[in-house]
Image (spheres, helix red, strand yellow):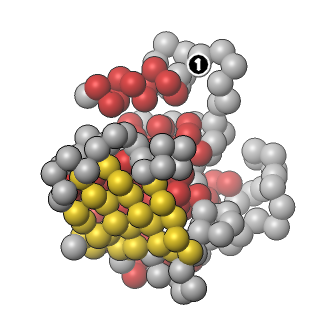
Amino acid sequence: MLRSVILLCVCGLACLGNGPIPHLPQPDYERLDSDPEWLAYAAQFHGHLGPWATAGTRLGMAGVREVDATGFFDVEVVCEGPFVKPPKSCFLDGLQVATGATLGKRNLHWARKPSDDIVVRVRNTRTGARAEIRPTGRLLKILGTLKPRIKAAAPGEHADDHAVEALARTIAALPDREILVVT
């Protein structure tokens, strides 16, 4: 609960609170009634509703749950994967939202893998509990349908924005067992 309150205050989302906080960037995101609350946090941090960021959020949430951590200061996250540039690198934004681990606090670490394999390792620094989370073939197939953009675009410039958001919402709605494996 405290984490949600802190994120709500920091994010200043018009769709969740009393309106935006002046001078903070506003995401290109229109919340639907069917969207889970956490999806708005991910969109605020990332800037829009994207499938790779949503996937990172889902895997990160599963990892934090598995090791019984509250996030921010009792987790260490190591992620291996092909996250050199967008859209794949957006996965790291989702991990930051879901786990509270950040590059700045140095409790989120990324190691480039020569293959497209993705693995997220989460450790509770208080208890030592560990989990390894991997995407399923189904999640990778969904993410594989996303075509990278040739250049950065202004919101609404591409007709595929709705398709991108639809993919993100699909990832957000699927049960864990269909998109991730925890060991």
Q: Residue at x 41, y 64 (%)?
A: 78
Q: Residue at x 40, y 43 (%)?
A: 100
Q: Is residue 13 visible?
A: yes
Q: Residue at x 68, y 54 (%)?
A: 161
When asked about the image quadrant of residue 71, the answer is: top left
Amino acid found under the numbered disc labelled 1:
Pro
Q: Nearer the viewer, residue 151 or 159?
A: 151
Q: Nearer the viewer, residue 165 or 144?
A: 144
Q: Which residue sits furthest bottom? A: 115
**Position of the N terminus by quadrant:** top left
Residue 23 placement (x, y as % from top left): 69, 19
When asked about the image quadrant of residue 63, the answer is: bottom left
Tell me if residue 49 comes above or below residue 51 in the rendering. Answer: above
**Position of the C terminus by quadrant:** bottom left
Residue 62 placement (x, y as % from top left): 28, 57
Q: Residue at x 65, y 24 (%)?
A: 24
Tell me if residue 108 comes above or below residue 115 in the rendering. Answer: above
| Total numbered badges shown on the rendered structure | 1
Element at label 1: loop
Q: Is residue 174 visible?
A: no
Residue 89 placement (x, y as % from top left): 60, 63
**In-image side of 132 versus 38 (left or right):** left
**In-image side of 178 versus 109 (left or right):** left
Residue located beneath label 1 in the image? 20
Residue 136 placement (x, y as % from top left): 36, 77
Q: Nearer the viewer, residue 50 or 132?
A: 132
Q: How packed is label 1: few (under 14 Cα within 10 Å), some, or many (20 or more)?
A: some
Tell me if residue 96 comes above or below residue 25 in the rendering. Answer: below
